[in-house]
Every structure is written in C-alpha cells, then in structure tokens.
Image (cartoon, rainbow, N blue to C red):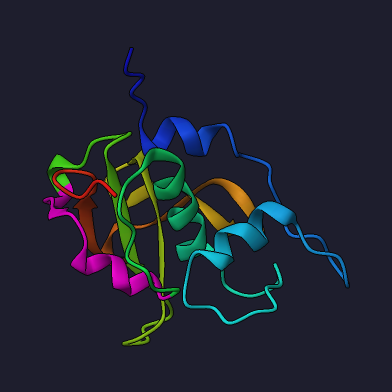
Amino acid sequence: MKIETSLYQVALNLVGIREIPGNDDNGFIKWCLSLTTVPSPHHDEIPWCSAFVHGLCKILGIKPSGSAAARSWRAKGTPVDKDHAEIGMDIVILSRGGSPTAGHVGVFAGYDGPDKIKVLGGNQADMVCIRSFPRASVIGIRRLGVGEQV
C-alpha cells in the first residue's frame, strides 16, 4: 500500500517546533541543517527556513535544492503562477528586506486577503508556524516532486 501526503500535511505536524535559546539546540532543526550546505556544528539560532524545507523533502522522498539558501529553491520543481498556487503542493520563495540575495522559503498555506500570502515554514518567529507576508515579496512559487523523487 502506498501512502501519499503533502508538504503541507507534514509541515502542519511540525508546527510549534522552535529554536532553543542559549547553548542548547533543537535536534530536529539540527537534523534539517545537516541536510544542507551549512557547515557543522549545526546550531538552531541561524537562518533555517531552507533547512526546514529540506527536512520536509527528506521525509517525503523529494529531491531538495541541496543549498541552505532560500533562493536556491527557485531552480527546483516546476514554476507556478501566483494565482494558481495550491495548498499542499507548492513552496513559496520570498525576497527579504529588498536584498538581492536574502530570502525566505516555506510551504504555500493560502492567501490572506488580496495583498498577503500565508506561508507555513520554519524560522518564522524562531519556530515552525504560519505567517502572512506581502504578496509583492513573492519571487517564486514552485511545485516540487514532479519527476524529482530521490
């Protein structure tokens, strides 16, 4: 029997995972970071949004970007128009602070009115949660998994 699930369903089960302040680190976040280009030792108080998406991909058997950079996900999967994104299927790549290199990535979780997009991701307020971002900050939406199984 084949059991199928989505990035969104897996991520929902991880809501509430958070960084541990100080010298301790969250083991799940450290594991996610180990799947990326972040050099050891892995600490949970560094940007880990891309690492979180790597963890989701590892759990689901989808080939990840391999990079700790959020913008690296722009080269994965199939591009999806902003108006055709689907909960459970797509990831969202966002620009951060107007920087040409800084970014954020997470799972598409719907729209929050006409000007905002909801993202279920890691490293959002130092935890896994759903947050709204301006739709204008979206630099890509990608559908993972099609022809990209590990």
Residue 64, by quadrant, is bottom left
Compared to residue 56, the image places residue 139 above or below, namely below
Closest to the observer, 50 or 38? 38
Residue closer to the observer: 2 or 65: 2
Q: Is residue 122 left or right of residue 119?
A: right
The picture places residue 100, in percent across and down from the top left corner, at: 31, 87
The total of numbered circles placed on residues is 0
Q: Quadrant of residue 63?
A: bottom left
- Residue drawn at point x = 44 percent, y = 30 percent: 9
State the residue in front, 134 or 90. 90
Query: Residue lying furthest bottom in this view?
Result: 100
Give the magenta range: 69-82
Q: Quadrant of residue 5?
A: top left
Name above or below for residue 124 compared with residue 44.
above
Left or right, 74 with reference to 9: left
Residue 146: x and y, percent? 15, 43
Q: Is residue 18 visible?
A: yes
The residue located at (81%, 60%) in the rendering is 20
Q: Is residue 19 rendered to the left or right of residue 6?
A: right
Name the residue rendered at 36%, 19% in the picture: 3
Tell me, yes or no, if residue 112 can be seen here: no
Position above or below: 36 against 130: below
Residue 62 location in percent, x, y? Answer: 31, 47
Specify whether residue 73 is painted magenta. Answer: yes
Task: Identify the image quadrant of the N terminus.
Answer: top left
Q: Is residue 108 left or right of residue 36?
A: left
